[in-house]
Image: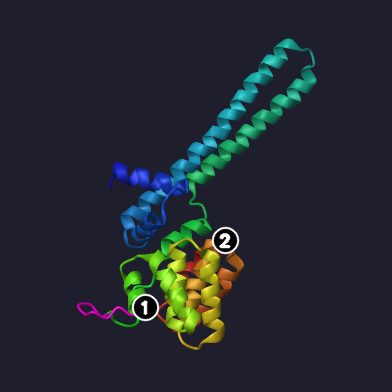
């Protein structure tokens, strides 16, 4: 299947880190659920890498041409020969790197793994009361989260936590902050939940591992994923799968 023009533009903006929060969420969901799209992204990553490395090779060719002109104007042949050998060797190394990058799949970056595995938590803990006049702050916060109005949800969740800390609110606020790109805040939410409550601590560890991954802290990400892999919760299989890619 050939990528559409929209897909190509989307992938180019992803590799240039130009996606908005909403676009990143959509991109992450497609990576997780659309095998064809994920294959296209992997292929595009290889092509972009080869093009960028080819640019380095072109620069070396230019340096080689400059060196040849220097040789024609100066009599220091021995020194020129050494320099020429250096440029040829450097060009050969770059060409080899290009071949390896094209032929062998590279290790995915932390950002790419985060995009592949992160989706905000969907099963909200209590039903919002639709069709009624009840508009309590708690109900409004949950509704904002469900409708992906994350800025509003973050504001309301923080107001609720200022009155009383609750594990479900901390958990959703952590997810909300991740969607808003506020990784340090999300990490703090999940760490507080794990340290202060017995409820939902395993689910919090999954999202905390993604926080570490987003921050390129692979050591702590691996620690969380190993702990989850030893459990029997629903995240265990995903944790084992992700751990293999992070190692």
Q: Farthest residue in the left direction?
A: 131
Is 82 left, or right, of 144 in this rendering? right
Is 200 left, or right, of 36 in this rendering? right
Sooner in the amino-acid sequence: mark 2 or mark 1: 1
Quarter of the image where one finds residue 25:
bottom left
Instruction: Judge whether residue 127 is colored magenta.
Output: no
The image's mark for residue 137 is 1
Counting every numbered tag in the picture gives 2
Q: Which of marks 2 and 1 is in front?
A: 1
Pick the quarter of the image with the C terminus.
bottom right
Asked whether residue 229 is in view, the answer is: no
Magenta span: predominant SS is loop
**Which residue is label 2 attached to?**
216
Q: Farthest residue in the bottom direction?
A: 198
* Residue at (51, 87) in percent of width and height: 197
For label 1, the SS is helix
Quarter of the image where one finds residue 145:
bottom left
* Residue at (80, 16) in percent of width and height: 76
Mark 1 burial class by Cα count in 10 Å: few <14, some 14-19, many 20+? few
Quarter of the image where one finds residue 82:
top right
**Range of magenta residues:** 129-138
Q: Farthest residue in the top direction?
A: 73
């Amino acid at each position: 299947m050939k990528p559409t023009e929209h897909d190509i533009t989307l992938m180019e903006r992803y590799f240039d880190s130009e996606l908005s929060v909403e676009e990143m969420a959509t991109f992450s969901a497609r990576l997780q659920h659309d095998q064809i799209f994920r294959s296209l992204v992997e292929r595009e990553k290889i092509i972009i890498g080869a093009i960028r490395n080819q640019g380095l090779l072109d620069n070396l060719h230019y340096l080689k041409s400059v060196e040849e002109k220097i040789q024609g104007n100066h009599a220091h042949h021995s020194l020129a020969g050494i320099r020429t050998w250096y440029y040829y060797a450097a060009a050969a190394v770059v060409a080899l790197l290009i071949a390896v990058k094209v032929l062998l799949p590279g290790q995915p970056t932390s950002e790419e793994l985060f995009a592949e595995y992160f989706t905000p938590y969907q099963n909200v803990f209590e039903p919002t009361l639709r069709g009624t006049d009840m508009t309590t702050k708690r109900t409004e916060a949950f509704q904002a989260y469900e409708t992906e109005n994350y800025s509003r949800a973050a504001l309301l969740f923080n107001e609720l936590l200022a009155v009383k800390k609750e594990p479900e609110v901390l958990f959703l606020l952590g997810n909300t902050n991740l969607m808003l790109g506020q990784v340090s805040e999300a990490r703090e939410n999940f760490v507080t939940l794990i340290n202060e409550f017995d409820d939902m601590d395993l689910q919090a560890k999954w999202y905390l591992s993604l926080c570490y991954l987003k921050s390129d802290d692979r050591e702590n990400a691996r620690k969380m994923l190993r702990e989850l892999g030893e459990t029997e919760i629903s995240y265990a299989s995903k944790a084992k799968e992700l751990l293999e890619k992070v190692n």
